[in-house]
Image (tube, rainbow, N blue to C red):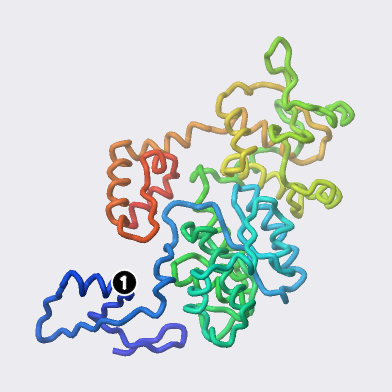
Amino acid sequence: IQSQVNGYEFIPVTNLVVMTSLEKKRVEQEGVTRDTNKSERTTTVESTTPEFDKLPYRSIKKTMTYAGIGSRQTPPEILSQMTDIAKELGSKGYTLRTGDAKGADKSFREGTGNSEIYRADDATDVTRAIAKEIHPNPDALTDYALDLMARNTNQVFGENLDTPVDFVLYWAKESNNPMRPQGGTGQAVEMANRKGIPTINMAVEGWRDQLNSILNIKTISSKSNISQIYDQLGDKTVSDNVRIENWSQLKDMTEPFTKAYDSIVHIIATRIKNSNKHFGNPFTHDSKIANRNKGLIKVSSIKEAVIKYIDWVINSKDERAQWIRKHLQTGELKGKPILYYDELNEPSHATALDYLINKYNWSSESQQLELFEDITLNQLKDSVNEKYKDQPNYTPLTLKDVISMTPEQISNLKNCL
């Protein structure tokens, strides 16, 4: 029976056993045999990628890392988007893995300080061997080019080759090989594709939808409709609890609250310099403000900044977002005045903060998790660990790992069984 995938013809073969040299040796030493009937034929084939075969597949657990890479010929408009995306992903708690080259690597690096940079001199004998196994023409590589291909392995699998990225985001021209785009970027992309790791090419229309699909899996509150929350904010900045205060009174604040007798009197909605404990918005529509504050993420409008703020507060694993959630979930801020510096004639992030403090149902997360009793989660953990225990570099799940997952992630785990 002959089939075709992406223009490539293949003939399905049954009873084909692919073994690394180590596996073959073990089989020979143990004298393992396989019974076959007259209609079967078993063929043993040496793997051509024994070192690559040892690398882990896509992790069941999020690693909160991604590879941001691409061609040095990446268009300027895409380079700008790469920097913005790196800022966005950094705000969600992701660690960037990239190289030290100009172009795409540099643009990703400029968007975040939370990164792992891999260079040619990071190559080892193991990663060089892997590079030769995967590269379509390894004999044509100079020593330096081989080291560049080798460091790509670290970009996808980490310093110790045991932590695969959650996805690869890149720009490169497509080739005739659906697994591998053109240029050196193709090396990392092919390795990821072979191990089931999502790859997203920013040169292809719809790449942002692909990225959104991956990021949505990682939301904490699966029933939160961010746009619906925004629609309930009204058409002004001032709300039930938001008050306008002169900027001169807010710009030098050093704490996120004003207090009297150790009790909270006001909530400060603006950013606080040199602090990671405040309620300020990491997104801004103002280019001047973004340029003055390297950590801010530039967006196209105030509305987009507010919507992203809501999503960030509810879902991000960023340390500051978690600090905000902790205070919001306690209920201690309910009814407290929120100080902001201007009436924008549309909702601001302070308006959204008022909603999240006083109207949002934070208990919905725990209610969703009640769909799965602890004993069920424990059984799920044991089942997953049993199924994947022989997978190279698999780290067993703990009950704490599973309890901390979202309902969607738990559902995905169940689907793996």
Horizontal and vertical percent position of residue 47: 36, 78
Question: Is residue 360 shown left or right of residue 12?
Answer: right
Image quarter in which the C terminus is found: bottom left
Where is residue 60, by image quadrant? bottom left
The amino acid sitting under disc 1 is Leu
Q: Quadrant of residue 4?
A: bottom left
Between residue 366 and residue 400, name the one nearer to us. Answer: 400
Decide: is 160 above or below 249.
Answer: below
In this image, 336 relative to 124: left or right? right
Report the side of 331 relative to 402 (left or right): right
Q: Position of residue 88 (x, y in %)?
A: 66, 52
Count of marks, rendered view: 1
Label 1 crowding class (10 Å Cα cut-off): few <14, some 14-19, many 20+?
few
- Residue 278 x/y as whole percent: 71, 32
Q: Where on the picture, by quarter, is residue 170?
A: bottom right
The residue labelled by disc 1 is 22
Q: Is residue 409 left or right of residue 215?
A: left
Residue at coordinates 87% horizontally, 28% vertically from top-left?
246
